[in-house]
Amino acid sequence: MPRLAGTLIVLLTFILLWQGFHLLVGSSAIASPLQTVVKLGSLLGTGEFWLNISETMRAFVAAFLLSLLGGISLGIVLGVRKLAGNVAEPILTTLYSIPKVVLYPLVLLCFGLGISAKIAFGVMHGLIPITLFSMNAIRQMKPVYRRTSQVMRLSPSQSAFTVILPAILPEIISGVRLGFSLTLLGVLIGEMFASQRGLGFLLTSAINLGQIDTIMAIALLLTVFAVSCNSLMMLFNRQLTHR
Amino acid sequence: MSEKWLRLIVVATMILLVELLCRVGVIPRMVMLAPSQMVVELAEILRTGQFSADIRTTFTNIAISTALSIVLGFVAGLIIYSLPALRHALEPLLASYYAVPTFVFYPIFITLFGVGSASIIAIAVLLAVVSMITATLNGLDRIPRVLRKTAQIYRMSRAKTALLVELPATLPYLFTGVKLSVAYSFIGVIASEFILSGAGIGYAIAYAYNLFENGHMYALILLVLVTVTIVNTILNMIDRRLQARRQR
């Protein structure tokens, strides 16, 4: 509990700093915390805003599911096949550190303007970290687990679901956490560059119109969403490891 | 060694496949140039110097933001490490930091610093600095106790201990932070230029895309890919050497 109190104090300090900054540079440059929350409230009251949220969410959920399925299955294959894994790993880490924005024009030319380009771009961001983490989870699993399941003569499906999956789950969740936020980032960047709908589009149009309170309200909404999903996954992971 | 060759063969086969598909016309010229044409286009723009100013701007910004995030991250890591109460409070926030889509704050920096290098560097530092902080904390946590005890036995001063014992012991971990800072600075700078800026490689790519100038666009994309791959390979080589030293 004192840990939580400390975090709360840090958050409060952050809000105070935000307010102080706002007073320093004026409300045309930075909206105050109160203004931002009020603006977010009024935005959430309009139907149009919800249309944009659902547009972003549709692309995000599709991209995240694809990254999840693709990443975990690819990671398991590369983890089990040692040679394939060793060959693929440096290629994957290089792909991971490439600024993928430069490939967005290629994605747009392949998929056209629309939701499929956003989904593809989100998958490009999310797939690799999930693959890398799943692969390492399998590789670093203690050999004794596999041997024990052999000694107990478990069938392949039994050993997969009762031994291997629980053993690698914490690692995989760490990968999924990273993949989650990167997929969201990918979808948002896609919307900011070329899109007519979605939260990213709202951000770019707010920039062009100079509506600082709208920008900050959307930033706040996305931050709260991403951080709470992340915390939930961390909580779930902690419960798994403390079992 | 054989793995290295296999990797080379895999990558070469993929490039050749794309080349073939482009030449045959399965991938239309409007969508993608053949890799060999990209190389020709890249040589052309490097020779004419058409984008030299943009290229210089981008790499300067990347260098500045890498240096800033390494120094700031290291110093912040030291401060947080020496104040356990602060660390306890910050840790949950650091753990979920990368969940925040940082680019969302780019517009705010634009209103503060204007459209230009300053706000681009700010967003790249914001993206990169936390990985350096985490790496510093991680490295300081893992100094074996025996090293500090040995330093005490030799009656080394605090400064000497820090310089001769603690710094070399944390170096492999710090380097992981450096590696991530470089990668995130690349991503931060080029993505910001791409979304909203008036200069730099990212801007030039977006501009060429809007004008359907596929030649320029793919030349610049290739430039970024090649640079990142080379930088990444060099950093990985140094990293592997440092890790090997740690295990000795």
Image (spheres, rainbow, N blue to C red):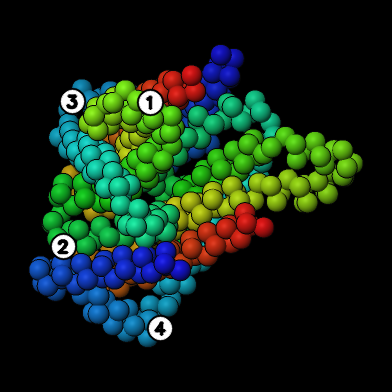
User: In the rendered view, would you say A32 is above or below B73?
Assistant: below
Q: Nearer the viewer, mark 4 or mark 3?
A: 4
Q: Are marks 4 and 2 on the same chain?
A: no
Give B198 or A149, whichever is nearer the viewer: A149
- Report, in whole angstroms, how far the alpha carbon at label 4 lies from the one at label 3: 52 Å
Give A19 or A88, whichever is nearer the viewer: A19
> Could you tell me the amino acid type at mark 2?
Thr
- Report, in whole angstroms, how far the alpha carbon at label 1 lies from the one at label 3: 60 Å
Label 2: state its secondary structure: helix
- Report, in whole angstroms, how far the alpha carbon at label 4 lies from the one at label 2: 28 Å
In the figure, residue B30 lies in which quadrant? top left
Q: Nearer the viewer, mark 4 or mark 1?
A: 1
* Disc 2: CA contacts within 10 A as few (<14), some (14-19) or many (>=20): some
Give A92 or B52, whichever is nearer the viewer: A92
| Residue sitting at x 38%, y 81% | A44
Give B143 or B16, whichever is nearer the viewer: B143
In the figure, residue A210 lies in which quadrant? bottom left
Chain ID for label 3? B
Q: Report which residue position mark 4 lands on.
A: A47
- Report, in whole angstroms, how far the alpha carbon at label 3 lies from the one at label 2: 36 Å
